[in-house]
Amino acid sequence: MSAFEVKNPDFALSPMTGMSRAHYIELAKYLLDRAFSHVSSIESPMVFPAVPGKTYPQPGSPDWRYRSAEFEALERTFTLAGPLIHIDSETTIRGIHLKDYYRLQFYRAFTPGYANSLPLPEDLQDSNYQFTCEFGGLFKTLLLLPDTIWPCFSEQQKKEMVVTISKWAHHRTTQNNWRIFNIMALSFLKKNGYAIDDELLKSHLLWVVSYHSGDGWYLEQTYNYYSISLFIVYTTIWNRTFGDEYYPEIAEIIETSAIKLMESVTSFFARDGYINMWSRSICYRTWVSGAFPVAFMLREATSLDAGWARRLCSGSLLQFVTREEFFHNDVPCLGFYGPKEYMVQNYSCAASPFLMFLPFICLALPEDSPFWTAVENDGMWEKLGTASNKVLLENPGLLLVNHGKTGASEIIPLKAFPIEGMGDIKT
């Protein structure tokens, strides 16, 4: 299969990329079509070929590592499948009905006795596990798109699954972005009428907002794209689907930081929407572009120009999906443009890069959202000429530089670029 091509581009609406809402749907189906080349039937778990090297699982790994890789593939491809099911519940890929497939596979994952059933925390050594991360991703999607698969389960099936869901939702986490994963799972349970430890949820929430350091950024071990993709994208979805109703004061803090972030997020992208290869988890690439549709989920009108937002979002996706070397075994490779082991971590598996399709939450926006209806434009770049635009983010200690002459953007740590003597800087 060849790399993605924008067919019948809509240059009236999107003069730079040709990408309309219909093309996003087409791209999501294209990506899943390649992924489902590894799925023989509705009965087949989502299993991608293992990648040699430091990634998991490797020969000799315990069974739970294989279950983790399967669950990661199932959950992260649902990042694409969920929005497609939301738009058209009868969507099929390679003859497999998406809603029926994910409904069956998640049921089996959460119900003991099946080949791909997840272990329970008490069956493993006392530690934190990748399962928690994937629960967070899944319930972020199900909170945003509640009409996809959860209503399809019988009350008895839900009762059976909630045992596993609740145990992992309440299981130990770590002192960083992982608290957000527990928040998503616990909030989903509470919203759907299941008992949770409310004090635990509140504790996670207070920890998360305490990480806010200013300029819309959160300290997550180091400052990197996680601060945008998880602390802004996931939590804004949480605000609209749960937080506004149950924890309005905390939701307001999150909302304020998201609004502030939108003032500078465009400066992380090149003129054509390309992203920089920056910091850890490089294989997640465009997950930071999820900030663009989230801007149009805020309670008040965002300061972000809708046409520019879609232009950057589309450009970042086209940066990769139009390159055949981006794919390995028909799925996004562990690397940047091609497979590169030195760019990944030992918590990565073949399915990990599907998190980069977080921007497809844009398909949850109504068709008349400005994100879809505004004409593409180049925003600040249109008047920049050959000059360079500088944005100083003092709290995360970053200087963002957009070069009008080349269309490139830089992310410069201030420890390498002292504040003194920088000249006229936009803040």
Image (cartoon, rainbow, N blue to C red):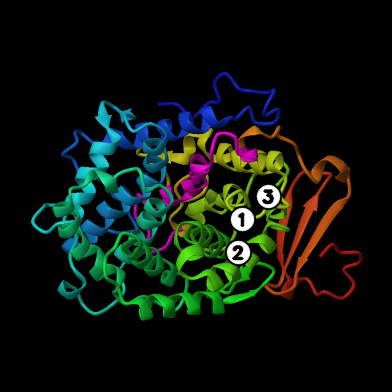
- The residue singled out by tag 3 in the image is 269
Task: Give yes or no for contact between labels 2 and 1 (Cβ–Cβ under 8 Å).
Answer: yes
Q: Quarter holding the N terminus?
A: top left
- The residue singled out by tag 1 in the image is 299
- SS at mark 1 in the image: loop
Q: CA distance from mark 2 to mark 1?
A: 8 Å
Task: Give yes or no for contact between labels 3 and 2 (Cβ–Cβ under 8 Å).
Answer: no
Question: Of marks 2 and 1, which one's residue comes earlier in the chain?
Answer: 2
Q: Residue at x 47, y 64 (%)?
A: 245
| 152 to the left or right of 426 | left
Residue 135: x %, y % from top left: 33, 60
Q: Residue at x 41, y 31 (%)?
A: 29
Vertical relation: 207 (above or below) 229: below
Q: What type is the residue that disc 2 sits on?
A: Glu
Q: Nearer the viewer, mark 2 or mark 1?
A: 1
Q: Residue at x 46, y 52 (%)?
A: 340
Q: CA distance from mark 1 to mark 3?
A: 25 Å
Residue 8: x %, y % from top left: 57, 18
- The residue singled out by tag 2 in the image is 255
Task: Give yes or no for contact between labels 1 and 3 (Cβ–Cβ under 8 Å).
Answer: no
Q: What type is the residue that disc 3 sits on?
A: Phe
Q: Is residue 347 magenta?
A: yes
Q: Nearer the viewer, mark 1 or mark 3?
A: 1
| 387 to the left or right of 60 | right
Residue 410: x %, y % from top left: 72, 56
Question: Of marks 1 and 3, which one's residue comes earlier in the chain?
Answer: 3
In magenta, the rendered stretch is: 344-371
Residue 76: x %, y % from top left: 37, 50
Can see residue 334? no
